[in-house]
């Protein structure tokens, strides 16, 4: 358990950690490749039976060892080792939307952004190398199952080439964007870039942008949390799509 708190170990094993019964149930329901169940030895056997599946090994772990290895303060006593899904393919299907997360350093913000992406209908997310690992334990917990419903990959040379060749508009969400987010037409396919609150988006993505959008704010508020801002923009895009669909 503790080894999968480190990115190096996650990459080497191509696996990540799930903690909490509900998250594990969600992973199983979504068809994720759960390799092992780790159950604290004081957990009722009837609760464990709901998680058991053919081919998944179940290990009972002494309470003291389990709690010491857990990444949460008040553990429920349920953990699982899950195989990482295949990374996103740089051949984005025609008509698909894409989210790029750039310089997000907080795993809680990472997980929340992924959760909002899944909830708003985006299916593919790219992570810039400058961002925190989306499979870090806190990011997975904050994602609340979004990791099981998204195609997640790392932005690399292949994706850079694909986006340069694509006609899909690349839109940066920035504090000083060129137009208000709700005046932009989100009904056509787009690539949305969310940059970190401190450093914004990298020059590599700025060079690819078609335009940028901002969220107008009242008073002297300097900026919104990146996950909050991203949620506002993504759900505006979803709202416009629903409105267009309702018109036939």
Image (cartoon, helix red, strand yellow):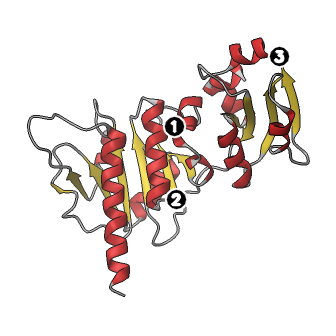
Identify which residue, 175 or 239, lies in the foreground. 239
Q: Residue at the location (57% across, 31% down)?
A: 136
Residue that protrudes farthest toward the bottom in the picture: 248
Q: How far apart are marks 2 and 1 (CA)?
A: 17 Å
Looking at the picture, how far across and down is residue 88, in whole percent?
58, 53
Give the SS element for disc 3: loop
Looking at the picture, how far across and down is residue 64, in whole percent?
76, 11
Pointer 2 local density, CA inside 10 Å: few below 14, some 14–19, many at least 20: some
Looking at the image, can residue 207 be seen? yes
Question: Is there a contact, CB below 8 Å, between mark 2 and mark 1?
Answer: no
Which quarter shows the N terminus? Answer: top right
Residue 52's place in the image compared with 244, above or below, is above
* Residue under pointer 1: 142
Numbered disc in front, either 3 or 2 = 3
Numbered disc in front, either 2 or 1 = 1
Report the side of 10 relative to 200 (left or right): right
Give the SS element for disc 1: helix
Give the SS element for disc 2: loop
Q: For residue 220, which quarter of the picture?
A: top left
Which quarter shows the C terminus? Answer: bottom left
Looking at the picture, how far across and down is residue 151, in whole percent?
58, 54
Q: Residue at the location (85% across, 43% down)?
A: 52
Q: Of the numbered discs in the image, which one, if any, rests on residue 62?
A: 3
* Residue under pointer 2: 123
Q: Residue at the location (67% across, 31% down)?
A: 10
């Amino acid at each position: 358990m503790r080894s999968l708190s480190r990115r190096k170990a996650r990459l080497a094993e191509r696996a990540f950690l799930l903690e909490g019964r509900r998250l594990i149930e969600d992973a199983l329901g979504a068809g994720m490749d759960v390799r092992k169940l780790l159950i604290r030895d004081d957990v009722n056997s009837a609760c464990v039976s709901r998680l058991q599946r053919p081919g998944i090994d179940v290990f009972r772990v002494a309470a003291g060892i389990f709690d010491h290895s857990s990444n949460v303060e008040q553990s429920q006593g349920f953990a699982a080792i899950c195989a990482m899904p295949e990374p996103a393919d740089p051949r984005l299907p025609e008509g698909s939307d894409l989210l790029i997360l750039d310089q997000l350093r907080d795993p809680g913000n990472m997980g929340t952004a992924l959760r909002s992406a899944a909830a708003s209908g985006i299916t593919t997310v790219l992570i810039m190398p400058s961002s925190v690992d989306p499979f870090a334990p806190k990011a997975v917990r904050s994602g609340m199952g979004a990791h099981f419903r998204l195609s997640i990959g790392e932005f690399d040379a292949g994706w850079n080439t694909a986006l340069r060749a694509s006609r899909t508009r690349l839109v940066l969400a920035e504090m000083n964007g060129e137009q208000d987010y709700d005046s932009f037409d989100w009904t056509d396919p787009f690539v949305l870039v969310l940059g970190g609150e401190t450093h914004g988006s990298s020059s590599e993505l700025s060079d690819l942008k078609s335009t940028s959008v901002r969220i107008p704010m009242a008073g002297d508020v300097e900026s919104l949390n990146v996950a909050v801002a991203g949620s506002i923009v993504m759900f505006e895009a979803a709202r416009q799509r629903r409105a267009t669909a309702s018109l036939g």
